[in-house]
Image (cartoon, rainbow, N blue to C red):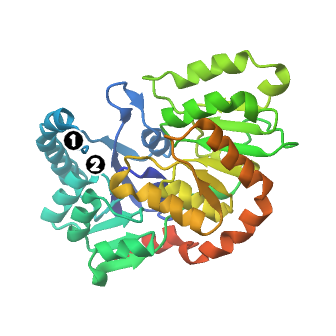
Amino acid sequence: MKILITGGHVTPALAVIEELTGHSIVFVGRKYALESEQTLSFEYKEITKKKIKFYNLITGKFNRGQFLFNLKSAFKLPYGFFQAYQILFSEKPDVVLTFGSYLAIPVALAAFTLGIPLYLHEQTSVPGRAARIIGRLSKTVFVSFPDAAAFFPKEKTLLTGNPIRTNVLKIIKKPFVVQTDLPVLYITGGSLGSHSINLHIEKLLKKLLPKYTVIHQVGDTKQYDDFERLSQIKGKLPNSLRRRYILRKHFSEDEVGYVYLTSDIVVGRAGANTFFEVMALEKPAVFIPLPWSAEKEQQKQAEIFKGAGVGEVFSQMEQSNLLEKEIEKLITHLSQYRSNFKNLKRLYKENAARSIATEILKS
């Protein structure tokens, strides 16, 4: 069977791809994380590493409150639909599986009009507009959170949970040595990093490093030069502290399991991938929700985590010293936070990727 996969959420896609061994896979996504910088995207690097054919799709997207951006973006929509039809005519997939985002809309519409069975996986607790549109056209909608099911037709919605990469759950490669005599913090803003989070950590570094080992995934956005600036700061630290600060632009699929399993807590965004990965690994977290995430789903997901007693929530608009206090709180009461993961058992579906793959292969 030939399966075309598309959408903006590549990590659950990678988990499902692991379950589709032996089938032909084609991926439609973004070659560049930011077109203005021509920085290769995480999805392009990881998908092509697996020798899967990758199509770069250029189409329009819309951001609330950005009139000029949206006006310019609207002119890309026809080209996005044209590309999508071209790809589907050329590849002739048996099914199309989408993982949401604006990128999936032209592919989903093309699949629907061509009569190709369409499937959607929705990661978040509150689906955005793109997912709701695609859900109406889909044969089956897979959701990660029970609350998300209310946004789609009941008769074609399945609660599967969020697919988690097996690489997250085990150590494949050890890219560096982590000093574990002190608690280990893993700080991440996602594959692109987060300038706001990086600025908070920059202010706190001299307070954190005497007490913790810090693994910091900075991202690769050239607009802010965070990695270069933080590298210079690291170079000026005393040797004893410098060894405790591990600075990287991003971690590969083979490295992320080592980073997670070595860490005591996670500090980062509250996207669905991070939410379900730290839940599976039972790693307490300080979540810093993206303020402009669609439908405020990151804020809601962070509050679910805090409500279960397995983490805390920090607003990026607050003072950096408050983030330090939240980190200290988690480390001081680490065993208590860990014991509370039983409160999230209902959300964790161990075989999410397999369930999705099995359903698709029924077509």
Q: CA distance from mark 1 to mark 2?
A: 7 Å
The kind of residue on which mark 1 rests is Thr
Residue 363 seen in render: no
Task: Give percent across and percent down for residue 188.
Answer: 58, 42
Asked if residue 146 lies left or right of residue 95, the reply is right
**Callout 1–callout 2 Cβ contact below 8 Å:** yes
Q: Residue at x 28, y 48 (%)?
A: 103
Callout 2 secondary element = loop
Examine the rendering and report whether any part of residue 300 can be seen.
yes
- Whole-percent x and y of residue 237? 76, 19
Q: Residues within 10 Å of mark 2 (few under 14, many from 20)?
A: many
Q: In the image, 81: left or right of 38?
A: left
Secondary structure category for the residue under label 1: loop
Q: Nearer the viewer, residue 274 or 284?
A: 284
Q: Amino acid at mark 2?
A: Leu
User: The C terminus is located in which quarter?
Assistant: bottom left
Residue receiving disc 1: 59
First-in-chain label (1 vs 2): 1
Label at residue 103: 2
Residue 242 x %, y %: 77, 24
- Classify 103 as above or below 344: above
Residue at the spot 57% in from the left edge and 24% down from the top edge? 227
- Which residue, as the protein is rendered here, is positioned at the far right? 181
The quadrant of the image that shows the N terminus is bottom left
Q: Residue at x 63, y 46 (%)?
A: 256
